[in-house]
């Protein structure tokens, strides 16, 4: 079993480590985790992200990430990269500088986009300053 305290936002090959964590372990991470399925329905949402985004789990889980939860990510920088990886059957592991704008003042963050055939879930990880 993974020790969530050992997982860092910028460590190489993070996807399998995140994928192996339980929901309780995801809540121990020092960065936001949004997990979603192939239909973009949010299936995982950790406490860190809930606290800093100001959105409860009840509000987020079961909803479409790019249209209902975070439409500010429904663009070529985020959503399109996931679509492209799924269409091509390739892995995605990219970190980008981003500005979140929905329901909050604009805030600069780093997003790490993780997806691939070997992962059970797709992830947007959010590192806040």
Image (cartoon, rainbow, N blue to C red):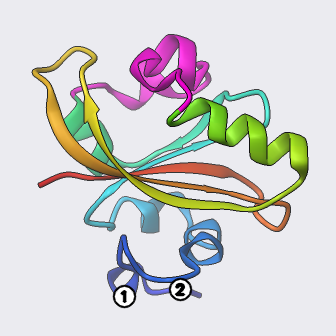
In this view, the residue in front, 34 or 25, is 34
- Residue at point 85%, 61% (across, down): 117
Q: CA distance from mark 2 to mark 1?
A: 8 Å
In this view, the residue in front, 50 or 79, is 79
Q: Please check the rendered image and state whether residue 71 is part of the magenta-colored stretch, yes or no.
A: yes
User: Mark 2 Cα within 10 Å, few/some/many (few <14, many 20+)?
Assistant: some
Q: Are marks 2 and 1 in contact (CB under 8 Å)?
A: yes
- How many numbered markers are drawn? 2
The residue carrying mark 1 is 6
In this view, the residue in front, 98 or 26, is 98
Where is 124 relative to 5, above or below? above
- Disc ID at residue 2: 2
Which span is picked out in magenta? 54-76
- Residue at point 25%, 33% (across, down): 99
Q: Quadrant of residue 103?
A: top left
Q: Nearer the viewer, mark 2 or mark 1?
A: 1
Relative to residue 23, is residue 81 drawn left or right?
right
Q: Quadrant of residue 5?
A: bottom left
């Amino acid at each position: 079993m993974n020790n969530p305290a050992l997982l860092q936002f910028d460590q190489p090959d993070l996807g399998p480590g995140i994928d192996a964590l339980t929901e309780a372990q995801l809540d121990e991470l020092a960065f936001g985790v949004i997990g979603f399925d192939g239909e973009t329905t949010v299936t995982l949402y950790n406490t860190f992200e809930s606290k800093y985004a100001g959105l409860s789990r009840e509000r987020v889980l079961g909803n479409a990430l790019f249209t209902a939860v975070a439409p500010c990510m429904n663009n070529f920088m985020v959503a399109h990269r996931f679509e492209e990886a799924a269409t091509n059957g390739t892995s995605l592991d990219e970190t980008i500088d981003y500005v979140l704008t929905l329901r909050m003042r604009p805030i600069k963050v780093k997003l790490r986009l993780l997806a691939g055939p070997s992962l059970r879930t797709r992830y947007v990880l959010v590192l806040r300053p």
